[in-house]
Amino acid sequence: MRLSISAASDTGRVRRNNQDAYGMDDRSGLLLVADGMGGHAAGEVASRIAVEVILKQVSQGLETGKIPAVGEVPLHLSDRGRLLLAAVRIANEMVYRSSLESPDRAGMGTTVVAALVRGGKATVAHVGDSRLYLWRKGKLTQWTQDHSLVAEQVQRGLLTKEDAVTALNQNVLTRALGIGDVVDVEIQEYAVRQGDVFLLCSDGLTRMVTDDEIAGVLRELSHPWQMCHNLVRLALDRGGKDNVTVTVGKIEGPLWWTRIKQFWKRQSARRQP
Ligand code: CA
């Protein structure tokens, strides 16, 4: 299985700076998005620290085979799950420590969603309301549930999905990275298939563009960079009220299969009148 990955990010049409950050690592099979919060550009600092620390910890862990011991680990978790969990927890500590160093950074934090896709499995960690969607066989599924007040009210039946779209306090998160010295990270593992597309995004996409519209873009396009670019463009066309960031990873077939498909595509295009 080959993973092809791409990303796109834009400040949007309203905000003055981009507090989102993203990371990608072909060799590790890691992609992630972080959406920072805090005044005086502290949100940018928080999201950048989170992305850098997670990328570094995961690649180091895969290289050395050593998993840092940081807190308790659920029994069912695989080695790569333990590694990703440790990386996110270390990122939390680093953001939190940095927030204590300067008054400008006090209270800064960030969301994070990370997918480690290797050897037929995807390990997904998230904190906050940045999301991971899976596009499989023409169907879009939201894999992560937002850690936000509104999403949790929907889960408890206190709010309908329709009301949630227009609800006040959309911004209130129930979990974020860097707010305290420990963080509750949600982590899950899935089997992956050829053709799967993983879409990670900040809420600047999902508040501007509906799930049906996202599905429409993924249905039309085959390259991750086209998907990222078109989704960001769509969010801007819809108003771009927030920073918008998208990373996409696609599980491609073997190289020979991809080349045959491209060959037939060219042949059939030539035959078109
Ligand atoms: Ca945001």
Image (cartoon, rainbow, N blue to C red):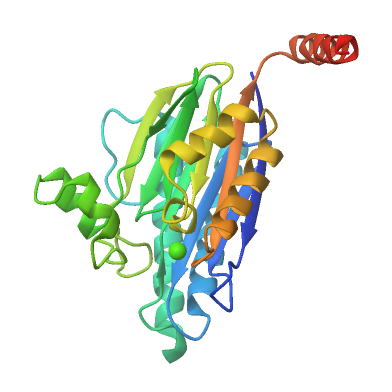
Q: Position of residue 238 (x, y in %)?
A: 52, 57
Question: What's the residue at 44%, 48% (across, down)?
Answer: 113
Question: What's the residue at 45%, 42% (across, down)?
Answer: 84
Quadrant for the N terminus in the image: top right
Viewer-closest of 209 and 111: 209
The answer to whether 249 is drawn above or below residue 270 in the figure is: below
Quadrant for the C terminus in the image: top right
The answer to whether 126 is drawn above or below residue 181 in the figure is: above
The answer to whether 46 is drawn above or below residue 202 in the figure is: below
- Residue pushed farthest bottom? 103
Query: Which quadrant holds residue 169?
Result: bottom left
Residue 262 left/right relative to 248: right
- Residue pushed farthest front? 273
The answer to whether 81 is drawn above or below residue 126 in the figure is: above
Residue 158 left/right relative to 258: left
Quadrant of the rendered image holding ligand 1? bottom left
Viewer-closest of 175 and 221: 221
Q: Is residue 66 visible from the viewing direction of this image?
A: no
Q: Position of residue 97 (x, y in %)?
A: 42, 74
Viewer-closest of 270 and 144: 270
Question: What's the residue at 23%, 48% (across, down)?
Answer: 162
Q: Position of residue 221 (x, y in %)?
A: 66, 30
